[in-house]
Amino acid sequence: MSRKRREQPIIENVTITGVAAEGKSLVRINDLVVFVPFVVPGDVVDLKILKKKHSYAEAVAVKFHKLSSVRAVPFCRHFGICGGCKWQNLPYEEQLRFKQQQVVDNLTRIAKVELPEISPILGSEETMRYRNKLEYSFSNMRWLTQEELTELDNPENNAQRKQPGLGFHIPGAFDKVLHISECWLQDEISDRIRNSSYEYAVEHGIPFINLRSQEGILRDMMVRVVTTGQIMVLLQAKVTNPSEKEQFMGLMQHISDSFPEITSLLYVINNKCNDTFGDLDVHVFRGEEFIYETMENLRFKIGPKSFFQTNSRQAYRLYSVVRKLAQLKPDEVVYDLYTGTGTIAQFISAGAKKVIGIEYVPEAIEDAKINAALNNIDNTEFFAGDMKDVLNESFIAEHGTPDVIITDPPRAGMHPDVVDVILKAAPKRIVYVSCNPATQARDLALLDQGYRVTAVQPVDMFPHTQHVEVVTALEKKC
């Protein structure tokens, strides 16, 4: 006999007190920390506990008694469902204040090293339509909100319950896609291309993919819009016979005819069970296979598989901070660790004797070499491989001892072996760029035996989210 699940009680008249990770807010009830989504500090609510552990719980607000004075009205109709932009209900100034505090808390509580005064966060000048890249997923059965389910409860509306969708995955559910009619993350041309493609596909009966059975044709759409005005659109499709190919090519022709402003219209035939296409051929339907982004006098060639910071204008401010804190001299050798497509390496190359870039992804290194040649930069070298394997004493002996190391690792931070090699290489200065203040703080504690922190500059790359970048400068201790 199955055990009946006990219904959790409602906790009444709780005042939300702070902001937590993953875009949630929090309140302490006795010794229990309770995390709550879609509320802001100052809200007075009734809470229903969903999950409870020893020292924390997760809950949802089931009733609002009082709205916070710092609450903002979300501007997106999909807020609270699609899972993105979780802080739209906070004014941007408040978002920046909490991000600043997040950096302070992590560096002081985890790193526990001597710190200078942390500089005020650099906010993004654009808080809407700031992303240069978005990816949308097709699904043969779109996710329905509770309101839609209620409206469609009538059996006569059963067909509408099975409508396809083109949009974003619901958090934590690979097979559930929320149909998006408007997204404020990217230029409105992205909305028009996506909506027009959806309408054509539905009208012409082109099957959307079933994410469980993998039946169907249309899989994925990627849109890039850069500051130069160039637009790249890439569609992925599962095609197994000439009839399906003809249907898919009809959609591609529709996009081409409807949006002449697209400069790079591409497609991928992907018959795998996932949407990754790094190992697949990209076909040009119209235009070029790439677009260009610019920063100062540099041009960066971006292909369909290229990585590039998704907030172009704020990336320029981030790289400018890196260049300033690096304090480069013309006779210095720089190592750029986790270089990606070499954007930072090329951005700072004019101020150094030589820049060595190291990156795990071979395709990214090829992009870095192409862009260096495009910009007539001859003092950069790029190497592919796992950082902890490539960056060793023999590599440094061959390519020169670094005077400055710039490191921009993934969210997990640096491997301890990489930290050890940096300490042995003993550069004069280190500039550490991080998208995760917690792991950066951990690494700063490891570097403290040889380096002192001289500057900390938070930068907001992603408005309306909890994410924050931190650029930290370190100097070798005497």
Image (cartoon, rainbow, N blue to C red):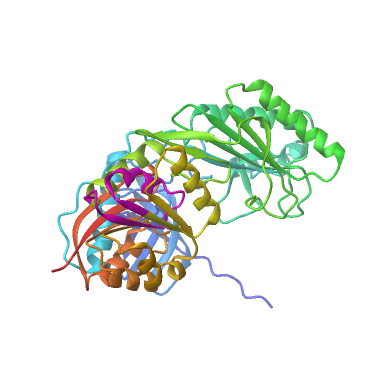
| Image vertical order of residue 206 relative to residue 460, above or below | above
* Residue furthest left as drawn: 478
Is residue 377 among the parts visible in the rendering? yes
At x 52%, y 50%, the residue is: 366
Question: Which corner quadrant holds the C terminus?
Answer: bottom left
Q: Position of residue 310 (x, y in %)?
A: 45, 42
Is residue 75 among the parts visible in the rendering? no
Left-right relation of 291 to 163: left
Question: Which corner quadrant holds the N terminus?
Answer: bottom right
Left-right relation of 157 to 315: right
| Image vertical order of residue 135 relative to residue 4, above or below | above
Is residue 328 within the magenta segment?
A: yes
Report which quarter residue 445 is drawn in: bottom left
Q: Position of residue 412 (x, y in %)?
A: 42, 64
* Residue furthest bottom as drawn: 1
Left-right relation of 165 to 368: right
Total marks shown come to 0
| Image vertical order of residue 400 relative to residue 323, above or below | below
At x 31%, y 71%, the residue is: 31
Q: Position of residue 390 (x, y in %)?
A: 45, 67
Q: Position of residue 396 (x, y in %)?
A: 36, 67
- Front in this rendered view, residue 261 or 183: 261
- Front in this rendered view, residue 456 or 155: 456
At x 68%, y 21%, the residue is: 257
- Front in this rendered view, residue 4 or 271: 271
The magenta-colored residue range is 327-355
Is residue 20 within the magenta segment?
A: no
